[in-house]
Image (cartoon, rainbow, N blue to C red):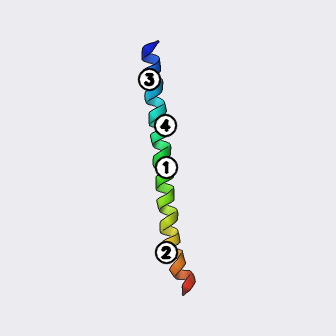
Amino acid sequence: MVVSTVFQAKYLLRKWLFLELLVYITDNITRKIQFVTIPLNII
């Protein structure tokens, strides 16, 4: 019983970390795209 809860906690933590990483990466990509497209719009 204790082993399964520890395993679940580790799994949820990994899932959460993966989602956080995914959000961070997509946020960085969108910022880079904006950084590239804004000067193009000015030109």
Secondary structure under tag 4 reads helix
User: In the rendered structure, which disc, 4 or 2, sits on the residue that comes first in sequence?
Assistant: 4
Label 1 SS: helix
Type of amino acid under label 2:
Val
Work out whether 37 lies above or below 9.
below
Q: Amino acid at mark 3?
A: Phe
Q: Residues within 10 Å of mark 3 (few under 14, many from 20)?
A: few
Tell which circle, 3 or 2, labels the residue nearer the N-terminal end.
Answer: 3
Q: CA distance from mark 3 to mark 2?
A: 43 Å
Task: Give the distance between the C-alpha atoms of the residues marked 1 and 3, in whole angstroms.
Answer: 22 Å
Q: Residue visible at 48% across and 46% down?
A: 20
In the rendered image, the quadrant that contains the C terminus is: bottom right
Q: Which residue is mark 4?
A: 15
Name the residue type under label 4: Lys
Of callouts 4 and 3, the N-terminal one:
3
The residue shown at (57%, 82%) is: 41
Check contact, mark 1 vs mark 4: CB within 8 A.
no
Q: How far from the left and from the top, in percent, is residue 15? A: 49, 37
| Label 3 with label 2: CB-CB less than 8 Å | no
Tell me if mark 4 has few (under 14), some (14-19) or many (20+) residues whose alpha carbon lies within 10 angstroms of its own: few
Secondary structure beneath dot 2 equals helix
Cα distance between the residues tagged 2 and 1:
21 Å
Q: How packed is label 2: few (under 14 Cα within 10 Å), some, or many (20 or more)?
A: few
